Amino acid sequence: MMKNRLTKIVCLQFWVFISFQLMGGHYVSAAEPPAPQGSRNFYQVLDELLADFEYDLKQGQVIGLKDLSIRNIATSENVPNSFKTHLELLITERIQKSVKTRVVHCLACRSKRTELNGQTMVIKAGEMNPAELQRIAKMNGISNFMDVAFAYQPTGMILSLSVSDAETSSSLWSRTYNSETTRAAAARRGVDYQQQSDPNQVALEYQPTLQIKPTLYTVMTPKAGSGYSTALAVGFRMMERYDNRQKEVGFEMNYYFDIPSLIGVPGASEDKSVIYNGVNLTLLFTHAWALFGSEENYNQPRAVILGAIGGTYASGLLGAVARGTYEWRLGKHWAVSGFLGYRPKSTVVLENNVTSSMSGIEGGIGVGYLF
């Protein structure tokens, strides 16, 4: 009997060992399923919130940091009280690492005092008595107080911070950080953090968003008289983006190089019908309409339609040009574009006051880099 029982135990241990090896050497508990791939834990999300606060500290956007003391920390009901001390230390660490200010731990600010008034016992807290709080702040050398509110839900976290003057109790700075709109969250979605700003704040504190784009074009352009020539063009575009990136307005400059002249085709540089053998400049006023929806996502290709009107100055020519462009943006920086333009009839002075006319359709394709 004992021998049979021992044999069963050895077989059971053998099968447990084989199962453990087949699972890759890791025990999997049915009560604690493994976290889905790509998920983030509590402290990773909290670190993203604090990283946004640290960014504001380094940019000098937080006011009232001199001789600071963290006064109150309020948390949602599902967060244990022991977490308050940990959160206070994390905020203190970010402040001291970013701005090197003095952070005062004011124990008297949170202490409660009991007074006996006749047969009534009264419990008083410093935070409920402004005069007492001012006395404590002056005694401890505190110039400003910070109050913290932290809320945690399965869908996200919210961290609210406010700074007030210890002497006057007036608010100096306040900001709320949401885990769904942090810089890290925007980067994961493939969008620019500036798109996450509050629309009302953007309207009140508008800061222009400029987009610069150098481009290299290959162009088929009309010659004086008749016919076409090929040119290599260098473009420089500067646009201001507005209406939540749905529209852009600005200008573009082009400088053309005649390709046959560049590669040394015999007689190409002496061809006076090609106006781009010498100094030339094309200047365009440009407006663009985005086709990528309400939000620009860098993880997806985006299409933009541009309309432009302007003119070209060259040796013997001053003429107008209108142009339409379809641009396909890839990633955050690269763009491929194709344009079709029309040059109305204009006079070209060729040589010895001999004149000709130039008009027709021109087109080209280009590759550019977006800043």
Image (spheres, rainbow, N blue to C red):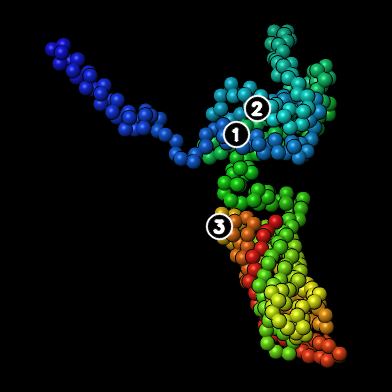
* Among the two numbered marks 3 and 2 on one chain, the one whose residue lies closer to the N terminus: 2
Disc 3 crowd, CA 10 A, few/some/many (<14, 14-19, 20+): some
Does 248 sit above or below residue 119? below
Is residue 12 rendered to the left or right of residue 102? Answer: left
Q: Position of residue 148 (x, y in %)?
A: 68, 30
- What residue does disc 2 label? 90
- What residue does disc 3 label? 300
Which residue corresponds to the image point at 73% horizontal and 49% vertical from the top-left? 201
Name the residue type under label 3: Gln
Of residue 246 and residue 273, the one placed in the foreground of this image is 273
Whether label 1 touches label 2, CB < 8 Å? yes
Which residue corresponds to the image point at 57% horizontal and 34% vertical from the top-left? 44
Which residue corresponds to the image point at 70% horizontal and 26% vertical from the top-left? 92
Name the residue type under label 1: Leu
Find the residue positioned furthest to the right. 352
Which residue corresponds to the image point at 71% horizontal and 11% vertical from the top-left? 114
Please tell me whether mark 3 or mark 2 is closer to you in this view: 3
Q: Position of residue 316 (x, y in %)?
A: 83, 83
Please tell me whether mark 3 or mark 1 is closer to you in this view: 3
